[in-house]
Image (cartoon, rainbow, N blue to C red):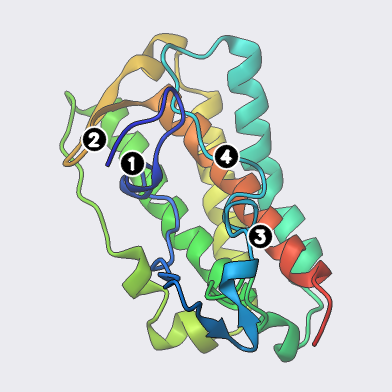
Amino acid sequence: MRRKAATAPMNVVHRLNIEIVPTLKVASRGILLRGIDLRMVDLEPLRYPVGRFERLSGPLDRAARDTHVKTIEDTPARLRSIVGGLSDAQLETPYRPGGWTVRQVVHHVPDSHMNGYVRMKLAATEDAPAIRTYQEQLWAELPEAKSAPVDMSLALLEALHRRWVLFLRNLPDADFARPYMHPEIGRVTIDQAVALYAWHCRHHLAHIEQALAAPRA
């Protein structure tokens, strides 16, 4: 796949551990999904309501890093405030045509962030460690990801982010340049990962907000 300037293309975003739902191919005759003709839907703003992730070309300055860490810190409370009182019917709302449900998105976030937390700690304590990917599309189709109460993932995310933020705020500035090695995209520094996961927080919060704001059929 071609690379476009500084914006990470679809496959690179996925390889950095960002949610990708299998693409729906729209044939010339069109595809109807729950009565929606996908030829008439621009999926780009629905997939990326806060824009695509743009990979850093250099280190973060202190102010930018602090902003990203604050986003990570605030996300569990924001997520709970949005979904904590939702009905099962609301939790089964897809965030876009063919996309994950709100419930699947909520369960995906700690799945992703546990991987991110471990990757950063490996980078901080080892010499450019090799990390492994995981099949997030398949994780999202497992029974507990499709049907479990969201409160368990909200509690998991709260505990995880408390540890994660404490780790990041006590990490020496120089250590943010330490990398891990991704099997497909190569070297990723802790600074790059911090920016990525802050974006990931905003990305999925926006998915849920757009799902809940969409008019009901």
Q: Secondary structure at mark 4?
A: helix
Quadrant in which the C terminus is drawn: bottom right
Q: Secondary structure at mark 1?
A: helix
Cα–Cα span, label 4 and label 2: 18 Å
Mark positioned earlier in the residue sequence (3 or 4): 4
The answer to whether the residues at label 1 and label 2 have Cβ atoms under 8 Å apart is: yes
Residue 43: quadrant of the picture: bottom right
The answer to whether the residues at label 3 and label 2 have Cβ atoms under 8 Å apart is: no
Q: Which residue bears the numbered disc 4?
A: 199
Count of marks, rendered view? 4
Mark positioned earlier in the residue sequence (4 or 2): 2
At which x and y percent is residue 109? 52, 59
Cα–Cα span, label 3 and label 2: 26 Å
**Number of the label disc, if any, that sits on residue 207:** 3
Left or right, 200 with respect to 117, comes to right
Cα–Cα span, label 3 and label 1: 20 Å
Q: Amino acid at mark 1?
A: Val
Q: Secondary structure at mark 2?
A: loop
Q: Amino acid at mark 2?
A: Ile
Mark positioned earlier in the residue sequence (3 or 1): 1
Mark 2 crowdedness (10 Å alpha carbons): few <14, some 14-19, many ≥20:
few
Q: Which residue bears the numbered disc 2?
A: 185
**Residue in the picture at 83% in, 68% down:** 213
Q: Which residue bears the numbered disc 1?
A: 12
Q: Which residue is nearer to you in this view: 38 or 175?
A: 38
Mark positioned earlier in the residue sequence (1 or 4): 1
